[in-house]
Image: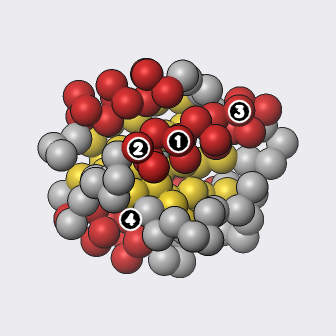
Amino acid sequence: MNSDKNNSDIYDVSVHDFEQKVIEASRQRPVLVDLWADWCSPCIVIAPILKQVIEKLDGRVALAKVEVDEGENMKLAGRYKVRGFPTIILFQDGEAKAHFSGAQPASFIDNFIHENAEL
């Protein structure tokens, strides 16, 4: 479930580089953060859907993937008051703008981005 190494719009993030790769990066373009876990079935379901939506946006939005069970990454789930996985948070201009939880179809995710991000 690693990020697509050929796509610079999709990358892994940890609590240690979150500030740079999400908060600061969101000042340049919106960043969707996928908080997920290996044991979470809906997380596995939504991963390829998120990838598909991000690829169609052709670099206008980044996808940062945070595996909550790795190292201290669960602290990020606590910081953003995440109640379940997956939780997807949209960051823009250094701030969390909107979020949703659970697996959703591509049309929902696309609408979520267009309604909440300035593209």
| Disc 2 to disc 1: CB gap under 8 Å | yes
| Whether residue 54 is situated above or below residue 111 in the rendered picture | below
Residue at 30% x, 69% y: name it: 25
Left or right: where 114 falls relative to 50: left
Secondary element at tag 2: helix
Distance from the alpha carbon under mark 2 to that under mark 1? 6 Å
Kind of residue indicated by mark 3 = Val
Kind of residue indicated by mark 2 = Lys
Kind of residue indicated by mark 1 = Gln
The N terminus, quarter of image:
bottom right
The quarter of the displayed image where residue 12 is located? bottom right
Closer to us: mark 3 or mark 2? 2
Q: Is residue 79 visible?
A: no
Distance from the alpha carbon under mark 2 to that under mark 4? 20 Å
Of marks 3 and 1, which one's residue comes earlier in the chain? 3
Left or right: where 66 falls relative to 114: right
Tally of numbered discs: 4
Residue position for label 4:
22
Residue position for label 2:
56
Residue position for label 1:
52
